[in-house]
Amino acid sequence: MSTLYAILTGIDVLLAVALIGLVLLQHGKGADAGAAFGSGASATVFGAQGSASFLTKMTAWLAAAFFANSLALAYMAAHRPKTESVIDKLQAEAPAPPAPKTQPLTAPAEKATPAPAGAPADLPPVDAAPEGGEADLPTVPEAPQVPENKDN
């Protein structure tokens, strides 16, 4: 199915390029005014009616082919089987690592103080900070002193 998808994609690109080329070859509606002044002699290559009917028919056929090919590509893309990557397979086979043991970020409260006056009744009491405050925090080591270079 992958090969067919690649072939249809290539055909779609070729049809798009051909369709763009045919549209650029055609004359606009304002180009007919120039034929009245003598520049319409080259239109006899494609017959008495000129190149308009030939290029118009070819554009219509190419547009229909491009549309049908694009619909086939859209159908194939929508019904493509889901493929898993190697990484997904390895993650499914590997056992999950044990969860690390974590400690709470804050120290447990020793006592709770009642809510201040005027606070809503459904709020829980506010936990008080532990005694000693900053004594429970780790200390930050001082940075070593670097001697100055006096040569600069």
Image: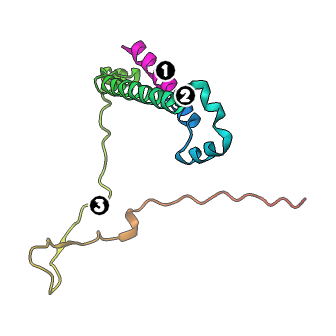
Q: What's the residue type where badge 2 is placed?
A: Ala
Q: What residue is at 63 percent from the left and 58 percent from the top? A: 143
Q: Position of residue 27 (x, y in %)?
A: 56, 40
Q: Which segment is the magenta one? A: 1-15
- Give the Cα distance between marks 3 and 1: 67 Å
Instruction: Check disc 3 and report the residue beneath it.
Output: 107
Q: What's the residue type where badge 3 is placed?
A: Ala
**Mark 3 or 1, nearer chain start:** 1
**Mark 2 or 3, nearer chain start:** 2
Q: What's the residue type where badge 1 is placed?
A: Gly
- Give the Cα distance between marks 2 and 3: 97 Å
Secondary structure under tag 1 reads: helix
41 horizontally vs 92: left or right: right
> Dots 1 and 2: beta carbons under 8 Å?
no
Q: What residue is at 30 percent from the left and 71 percent from the top? A: 131
Q: Determine crowd level at label 3: few under 14, some 14-19, many 20+ residues with C-alpha closer than 10 A.
A: few
**Is 23 rendered above or below residue 117?**
above
Q: Position of residue 78 (x, y in %)?
A: 30, 27
Circle number at residue 10: 1
**Is 133 rendered above or below residue 68?**
below
Circle number at residue 48: 2
